[in-house]
Image (tube, helix red, strand yellow):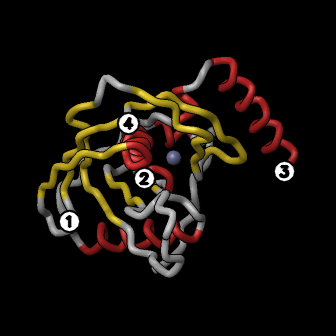
Amino acid sequence: MAILDIVTFPEPSLKKVSVPVETIDDELKTLIEDMGETMFHDAGVGLAAPQVGINRRVIVYDPHAGEEQKDAEDKTFTALINPEILSKSKETFTSEKEGCLSVVDYRADVRRHASVTVRAMTIDGETIEFDAHELMSVIMQHEIDHLDGILFIDRISALKRAMYTKKRLKQLKNKK
Ligand SMILES: [Zn+2]
């Protein structure tokens, strides 16, 4: 297992549409294990393969995200291969202070569908379908967006995005 480097905005590969996974092989399983480990290491609740520089349609997430009685030792994650959103509720809500490991030092409120129906393949090659609500719904929309080259800052106002972009470019410049 290994902790992977996170690709951060404005890296162009984050804007790429990822390709579907065709076979579940050992390489993919290793990637998934490493993604799970990286997500918990960096205190994330979800991580998409493009965030570790692999433009393939794979996500991992913490199925216990947001639970109040969360067991700190519980580091089990769930992986979804080729996930897709089959339907979205008309009802929307605002996810408060949404963040992303690829969008450094920034959080924003984002308008999200209250629930979504997801279809995906498990690591065992089984096709599953489920409904996700509230925080889980946000995680699904956020992570599946990554596979289509979309970041949460693409879903906020152009003004806020421009302000963040400016701040981020300055931050990167100062690092050099
Ligand atoms: Zn993200």
What residue is pinned by disc 3?
175
Helix, strand or loop status at disc 3: helix
Report the residue at 12% width, 62% height from top. Answer: 126
Cα separation, mark 2 vs mark 1, equals: 16 Å
Helix, strand or loop status at disc 4: loop
What residue is pinned by disc 2?
48
Label 3, residues with CA under 10 Å away: few <14, some 14-19, many ≥20? few
Can you tell which quarter of the image residue 44 is in?
bottom right
Is 169 on the left-hand or right-hand side of 152? Answer: right
Can you tell which quarter of the image residue 17 is in?
top left
Question: Of residues 169 and 157, which is closer to you in this image?
Answer: 157
Cα separation, mark 1 vs mark 4, equals: 21 Å
Label 4, residues with CA under 10 Å away: few <14, some 14-19, many ≥20? some
Amino acid carrying mark 3 in the image: Lys
Amino acid carrying mark 2 in the image: Ala
Report the residue at 35% width, 74% height from top. Answer: 30
For disc 2, does the CB lie below 8 Å from ligand 1? yes
Where does the image place residue 10, in percent across and percent down from the top left? 63, 38
For disc 3, does the CB lie below 8 Å from ligand 1? no
- Numbered mark located on residue 148 in the image: 4
Is 163 on the left-hand or right-hand side of 38? Answer: right
Label 1, residues with CA under 10 Å away: few <14, some 14-19, many ≥20? some
Where does the image place residue 48, in percent across and percent down from the top left? 42, 52
Amino acid carrying mark 4 in the image: Asp
In contact (CB < 8 Å): disc 1 and disc 4: no
What residue is pinned by disc 1?
24
25 up-or-down from 148: above or below: below
Instruction: Compare marks 1 and 4 and give the one earlier in the sequence.
Output: 1
Indicate which label's residue lies in the foreground, 3 or 4: 4
Label 2, residues with CA under 10 Å away: few <14, some 14-19, many ≥20? many
For disc 1, does the CB lie below 8 Å from ligand 1? no
Instruction: Compare marks 2 and 1 and give the one earlier in the sequence.
Output: 1
